[in-house]
Amino acid sequence: MGWRIWRPNRFGLQFNIGRFAGHIHMNTIWPIEHNKLTTEQTEKLHQSLRSPFKNRLQQFAIDEGLGDYLASFYIPFASWLGEKQSTVSRTLVVGINGAQGSGKSTLSQLTADILTQGFGLNTVVLSIDDIYKTRQQREQMAIDIHPLFKTRGVPGTHDTALGMSLIQQISTLKAGQSLPIPHFDKGNDDRSPKNLWPRCTGPVDILIVEGWCVGTQPQTTDELTHATNPLEKNEDEKLIWRRTVNEHLKTDYKEFFGLLDCLIFLQIPNVDCVLKWRGLQEQKLAEKHQHERHLMSTQKSLKRFIAHYERLTLSQLKNMPDIADLTITLDNHHQIKRALIRRP
């Protein structure tokens, strides 16, 4: 059987922090040595979560085949996060990093559902996209600093002070208290009106902060010198834009990311996948916001947009596996291939 040690959290739920010989699937994607659930526990959770998990996939217009990963990955992943939360006396702040189109938003929401419904842990998702500076602020940056800052996405275009304030406020919510969470309307390329912001209620056990540059480290001076693509070569000849981005990673973004308790990296096969997968996202957005004018309707405009992200995406693919607590590797078909825990 193996040995077991049980540690209850404040909800009365118990997370096994020992090891078991038996698991629901021997070929599970989640590393067996870090699976703290018995076969019986996993099966029980699978039965109760299967229907809401399927409903969420339908809501996101995602292939229901992803349901096969509920027991082999999502449930043990949620259990691992639940175990981490049981060791702290406050809100656990989890960062999820993934390239454009990698599926980090889907991963975050599905995991939040499982943590809330299966483990009784109130979980909130905060997307770094929702703390973008307003269109007016970015247009002013484009005038004052560099034209490329008009395009949202890179470090410097987020309101990190707002992000840090939100983490602090969410973490201190008490029972019965609620807080509005900013929402960025990509169709209008600006924040939604405050009366449309969703609200979260306390107390919050786990806060997931997801975004393409979450946890990203600054680059060296030598790395900044080489232009990654024609956009940088032709429109940032004096390196003003990329140096400013890097300075933000050294300062306010470092402070922002310093609030994370653990970091998850969603690793794509290569940067070519970004264009393909982000293109699929844009198609869904276009169908949802047919009347909006800020969506990238052509391959050319999408390639230009992604070029803003390419430098740091390449840097993350190189360095993030050595930084993240957990790396989730995707294959060329956008399927989870394996999960590797660097720090238990």
Image (tube, rainbow, N blue to C red):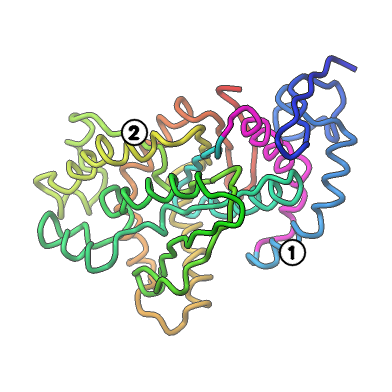
Please rate how many residues cluster around mark 2, counting C-alpha atoms within 10 Å: few if below 14, some from 14 to 19, many from 20: some
Q: Is residue 22 left or right of residue 225?
A: right
Look at the numbered disc 1 and give the secondary structure of its residue.
helix
| Residue 54 higher or lower than 94, as above or below | below
User: In the image, what residue type sits under mark 1?
Assistant: Asn
> Is residue 265 rendered to the left or right of residue 30?
left
* Mark 1, residue position: 55
Instruction: Assign the N terminus to one quadrant of the image.
Output: top right
Q: Is residue 63 magenta?
A: yes
| Residue 218: image location, x then y, percent | 28, 34
Q: Residue at x 38, y 43 (%)?
A: 313
Residue 217 image label: 2
At 51% from the left and 57% from the top, the residue drawn is 277
Q: Nearer the viewer, residue 185 or 151?
A: 185
137 lies above or below 173: below
**Prevailing SS of the magenta stretch:** helix
Q: Is residue 103 magenta?
A: no
- Residue at 81% over, 54% down: 50
- Residue 41 percent coordinates (x, y): 86, 37
| Apparent side of residue 94 relative to residue 33 in the rendered image (left or right) | left
Give the distance between the C-alpha atoms of the residues marked 2 and 1, in whole angstroms: 37 Å
Q: Is residue 13 left or right of residue 296?
A: right
Is residue 137 placed above or below 25 in the rendered structure?
A: below
Q: Position of residue 247 (x, y in %)?
A: 21, 39
Q: What span is in magenta? A: 62-89
How packed is label 1: few (under 14 Cα within 10 Å), some, or many (20 or more)? few
- Mark 2 or 1, nearer chain start: 1
Query: Residue at the location (47% across, 68% down)?
Result: 197
Q: Nearer the viewer, residue 278 or 78?
A: 78
Q: Amino acid at mark 2?
A: Gln
Give SS at disc 2: loop
